[in-house]
Structure formats: C-alpha cells, structure tokens
Image (cartoon, helix red, strand yellow):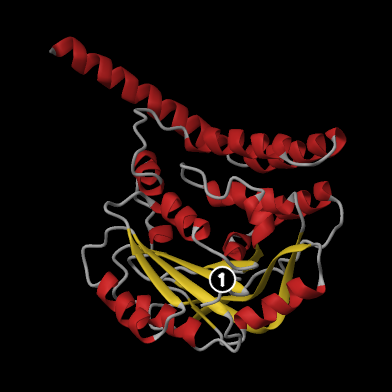
C-alpha cells in the first residue's frame, strides 16, 4: 500500500459479530471503487470474529485487523478506526449492515463534484436478519442549504419526523470535516451530536442509484429497548464511572456546546440553539423520568448507607 494512502478509508468497529461480519467485509470487497483500505477494530470479542476478519486480511492486503485488549465501549472503538484512517474520505460500516457494490463510488463521485458537501449517502432500506426487505426510507434526507442555521433546522425537522436520518452517518464522509468535530463522545447518543457538528460545517447529499441496507435482528444494539440508562452509558463508554446518568440532559448540553464551538456567527448560533431546544422540548417527559429515576436512586442509596 502506498505511503500516500488510499482514496477511501473504511472503518469496521466490531464486537462479537461472527454471525454477520463476513457479509459486511464481502460488501467491501465487491465495491466497484477499489482504492480503499478496510480497518477492522475488534473490541475484545469472545467469539470467532477476529479469526474471520484475519482470514480476509490474509487474502487482501488492503484489510488491517487490530484488536483491543479489552472492550472499550462502542464510541472509543468507532473513534479508533477513524484515528487509524489515511484516506481522503472515510466511511464507517457496522458489522451487520449490507450495501450495494456501487455505494462508495456513488458517494465519492458526489463529494468530488460538490466541495461544500461533507457527507454523501445512498437511499436507505431496512431489512431483516436474512436481508429481506422490511420497509423503505420515509423521507428524503438531503441538507442542501448554504446556511448552517437552515441545515440544522432541516436536520432537527428530520430527527423529529423519523429516525432514518441517524443512519446517514454510515455514508461516505469528507475526512477533513470529521477531523474538525469531536467525532464520537464518551456518552450514549454522541452520534447525534456528531451529525449536528457535520451539519454545521457542510451539506449532506443523498445520492441515487445505490442502497444501504440496515439489518434489523434480535441482537442489534439499537433494538434493545429494555436497557437502563446506565447500561446504555456503559455500552457507549466502558469506563463510565458515573453513579447517576442523565442521558437527555447530557445530549442537550452536548448539542448546545457543539453549536457554540462551531465556526458560525452569533446570530446563527442562536438560531441553531433554538432548533435544538425545539427538538428536545418533544422529550420533556424523558427529562422528568430521568430526574425522578435518579432521585429515587439517590434516596435508595442513602437508605442503604444508613442501614449499614
């Protein structure tokens, strides 16, 4: 591999993904664009994930496999594959998702055509564990305005209306724009803040002619609704030592901090902040629940301490 680096770096963070990870790698190998590197970062899997990935690396020098000594949590692993990337463009892939062979080429072509675009992604479809269609994308996801405040307003509108926009992060990204963000923070939901940071810096383009197939299956972390806030916090960042977790409060705070860090004028920052507050106003019940749950935990903790 040349010292200049590939055109596209692809990051595959994975933990115990033996059932599907081979399919994800096969999708990369099938791409019509061949100037890529694939960086696999295994989060101390206890199954055959590493062996499967290394078997592919032995056959194709564009594939690198690194392994964490322990499970760091999701966000440090996502950050690690980005830190190891060398390409002009970057793409994350989940171990259980699928995508067409023209995916990367179509997205790169769009980013090459439009220097203002920081993210390009194809049409999204949801499929089941066997790859069969469940449903299509609900809304068109492009953020085309040259105004950061208008792009953020459009992003917030899409987030309120549908979760499909959250999967756009698995498109192809301009790596220089990603470097200008905090990437993934050590808390649950940091990918939402990441999308906001990107929208503050450039346009999002949906491209036709290819599809991204998001697989829904019983083991998918995004479908585990029974998790507590603390469990989700530890899933995101294994070294989270907080006794009390306020996920919605943290997300609101991080959204507002991202806006005030961004290279946007004061009026634009105020408009963006108003859009974010409008989104979180829809979750007022969740704020009440997390405050009451944490208050109950404190009360129980104090009662336990008095009983000792």
| Quadrant for the C terminus in the image | top left
Considering depth in this image, is 66 or 203 the residue closer to the camera? 66
Counting from the top left corner in percent of width and height, residue 45 is at 26, 62
Where residue 18 sits, quadrant-wise, is: bottom left
Report the side of 214 relative to 307 (left or right): right
Disc 1: which residue: 3
Question: For the residue carrying disc 1, how many other residues have a C-alpha within 10 Å: few (<14), some (14-19), or many (20+)?
Answer: few
The residue lying at 34 percent from left, 44 percent from top is 238
Counting from the top left corner in percent of width and height, residue 245 is at 41, 32
Where residue 258 sits, quadrant-wise, is: top right
Considering depth in this image, is 166 or 278 the residue closer to the camera? 166
In this rendering, the answer to whether 49 lies above or below 304 is below
Counting from the top left corner in percent of width and height, residue 211 is at 60, 81
Considering depth in this image, is 180 or 213 the residue closer to the camera? 180
Report the side of 33 relative to 147 (left or right): left
The residue lying at 39 percent from left, 29 percent from top is 293
The residue lying at 39 percent from left, 27 percent from top is 294
- Asked if residue 263 shows in the view, the reply is yes
């Amino acid at each position: 591999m040349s010292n200049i680096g590939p055109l596209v770096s692809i990051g595959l963070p994975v933990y115990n993904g033996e059932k599907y990870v081979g399919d994800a790698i096969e999708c990369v190998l099938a791409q019509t664009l061949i100037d890529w590197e694939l960086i696999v970062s295994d989060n101390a899997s206890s199954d055959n994930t590493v062996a499967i990935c290394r078997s592919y690396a032995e056959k194709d020098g564009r594939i690198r496999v690194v392994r964490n000594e322990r499970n760091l949590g999701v966000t440090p692993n996502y950050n690690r594959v980005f830190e190891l990337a060398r390409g002009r463009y970057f793409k994350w892939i989940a171990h259980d998702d699928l995508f067409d062979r023209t995916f990367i080429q179509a997205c790169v072509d769009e980013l090459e055509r439009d220097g203002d675009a920081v993210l390009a992604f194809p049409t999204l479809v949801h499929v089941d564990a066997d790859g069969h269609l469940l449903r299509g994308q609900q809304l068109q996801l492009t953020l085309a305005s040259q105004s950061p405040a208008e792009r953020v307003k459009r992003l917030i509108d899409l987030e309120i209306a549908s979760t499909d926009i959250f999967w756009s992060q698995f498109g192809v990204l301009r790596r220089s724009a990603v470097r200008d963000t905090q990437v993934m923070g050590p808390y649950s939901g940091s990918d939402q803040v990441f999308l906001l940071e990107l929208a503050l810096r450039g346009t999002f383009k949906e491209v036709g002619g290819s599809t991204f197939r998001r697989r829904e299956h019983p083991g998918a972390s995004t479908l585990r609704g029974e998790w507590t806030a603390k469990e989700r916090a530890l899933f995101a960042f294994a070294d989270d030592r907080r006794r009390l977790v306020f996920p919605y409060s943290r997300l609101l705070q991080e959204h507002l901090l991202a806006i005030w860090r961004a290279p946007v004028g004061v009026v634009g920052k105020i408009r963006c902040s108003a859009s974010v507050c409008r989104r979180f106003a829809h979750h007022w019940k969740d704020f009440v629940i997390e405050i009451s749950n944490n208050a109950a935990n404190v009360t129980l903790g104090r009662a336990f301490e008095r009983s000792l």
